[in-house]
Image (spheres, helix red, strand yellow):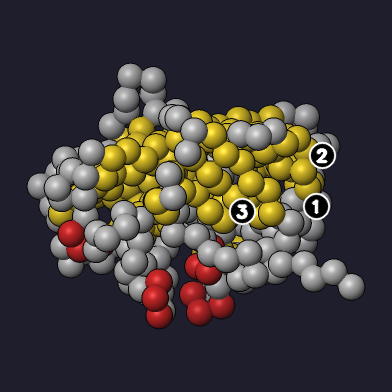
Amino acid sequence: MSVVAKSGTQWTIEAQGHRAVLAEVGGTLRHYSVGGREVLDGFGPDEIAPASAGTVLAPWPNRIRDGRYTFEEQNYQLALTEPARQTALHGLVSWSRWKLAEQRTDSVTLEYDLPAQVGYPWDLTLRTRWTVSADGLRSDQEVTNTGDANAPWGFSVHPYLQLPGVAVDDTLMRVPGQSRILADSRLLPIGAVKVHGTEFDYTEPRRIGDAVLDTTWGDLIRDEGGGSSVTIAAPDGSQSVTVWGDDKFHWWQVFTGDTLEGERFRRSFAIEPMTCPPDAYRSGRDLIVLAPGGSWQGSWGVRPSQG
């Protein structure tokens, strides 16, 4: 009897010193390194992805209050996957087995057919192409509504990034958000405020210090191509990591790991490009509606640098 790793089959892609490993369970980004330097704070093949490390968050990111929402005048109830906060957290695909669609030395494409189910009665096909090159790691996501009715859709990913040898407190960070979501004790939105001149203003790089972040930023400063990016850097400029998202992403979430236990406590940054804010199924804000046969595409990636 063969023994299968808890995270399933592993697919490795490599190019010009960049190496990434994708795992079958969740279609998860389990490892990413450059020249032997760990960029991703990942996990072992026989571990269950800790704190959603490297997972795909779909068909919604973040939280839905009480797991309840109304879409096109119909009410739905999702399972509460975060019981302590009574929320439906991070979608429906993190623990499913994705299948290999195509593999090359420097890229791999994984697919998952999400079946209609209680609380989300729509059929979707998700397809993710992962590529490594001298430019870094790139992920191209596509989803198609294979059902016969409109479907709500939101997307994010949950990579933890690190700067080896640099403490979270000493890290310089830039976030292009000009506003942030105000959250209640359940980390659900109750409003939004501008960040200019406040402790949450990271539009110019500055030291994290003792800031405790599990924060959503919006009203993004865009680059020339319409996308945006978050950068973490060592104080001496010796290394940095940029997470970028194209113009399909309207929000950023940054989490400094303060609620994690053991070695993972405040060790790295979860940096998440999101198409919509938390609880978007209820608010409708930036919620994507996929028509029958319709598709959505978006791209994001990680760009490490040194020196």
Tell whether label 1 touches label 2 (CB within 8 Å).
yes
Tell whether 191 sits left or right of 96.
left
Q: Position of residue 183 (x, y in %)?
A: 34, 62
Q: Is residue 10 above or below residue 298?
A: below
Placement of 176 over or under 213, stated as above or below: above
**Crowd tier of the residue under label 3, counting other residues whose Cα lies within 10 Å: few below 14, some 14–19, many 20 or above:** many
Residue at the spot of label 1: 116
Evaluate if marks 3 and 2 touch, with contact meaning CB atoms under 8 Å apart.
Answer: no
- Callout 3, which amino acid? Thr
Spatial CA span between label 3 and label 2: 25 Å
Mark toward the start of the polypeptide (1 vs 3):
3
Image check: 129 left or right of 194? right
> Which residue position is annotated with label 2?
147
Q: Earlier in the sequence, mark 2 or mark 1?
A: 1
- How far apart in space, not on screen, are marks 1 and 3 (Cα)? 22 Å
- Can you say which quadrant of the picture contains the N terminus? bottom right
Count residues near mark 2 (Cα–Cα under 10 Å), then give few for <14, some for 14-19, many for 20+: some
The amino acid sitting under disc 2 is Gly
Q: Are marks 1 and 3 in contact (CB under 8 Å)?
A: no
Q: Counting other residues with Cα less than 10 Å from the Cα at mark 1, is it few (<14), some (14-19), or many (20 or more)?
A: few
* Disc sitting over residue 28 in the figure: 3
- Which amino acid does the dot numbered 1 rest on? Ala
Q: Nearer the viewer, residue 226 or 145?
A: 226
Residue 63 on image: x %, y % = 51, 60
Q: Secondary structure at mark 1?
A: loop
* Of pointers 3 and 2, the one earlier in the residue sequence: 3
